[in-house]
Amino acid sequence: MKEVIVYKNLKDVRVSWEHKSNIEANSWTALYVNGVQVGADHNRDTTTYLEVSDDLSGIKVGDLIQIWGDHLDGIRIIRNMKIKFVEYINNVS
């Protein structure tokens, strides 16, 4: 599992990551917030990385953004977790 703690309120977020298995057998990953699945199951059955993403909204300070996964026979590998969002700053004086 990969996990990050959010330190600011975020309206719209895209979380992406890459995953693969170490053998040609089914593995899956999914996006969770605070232990509850909020994204789709992403299945992979080869030894090459696949980039996947899910969109979130309404993330609050202290929330945990997590990537969970499982593998039937081998090891699933998760890397390059990225959290993308837009922050608007009003510079009008």
Image (cartoon, rainbow, N blue to C red):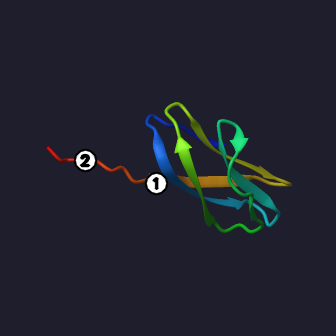
Return the residue nearer the eye: 9 or 20.
9
N-terminal-most mark, 2 or 1: 1
Q: From the viewer's perspective, is the residue at label 2 or at label 1 nearer?
A: 2
- Report the residue marked by disc 1: 84
Which residue lies at the image location 63% right of the left edge and 66% below the top edge? Answer: 49
In the rendered image, the quadrant that contains the C terminus is: top left
Which residue type carries mark 2? Asn
Q: CA distance from mark 2 to mark 1?
A: 20 Å
Residue 18 appearing in the image = yes
20 left or right of 57 in image:
right
Q: Which residue is mark 2?
A: 90
Question: In what element is the residue under mark 2?
Answer: loop
Give the x, y percent position of residue 83: 49, 51
Give the quadrant of the N terminus. top right
Q: Residue 40 location in percent, x, y? A: 71, 57
Return the residue nearer the eye: 39 or 1.
39
Dot 1 falls on a residue whose secondary structure is strand
Tell me which residue sits at (32%, 50%) in the image. 88
Quick one: which residue is furthest to the front in this view? 93
* Circle 1: residue type: Lys
Q: Which residue occupies the foreground of this view, 10 or 30? A: 10
- Identify whether 62 is placed above or below 1: above
Image coordinates of residue 76 in percent, x first then y, are: 72, 54
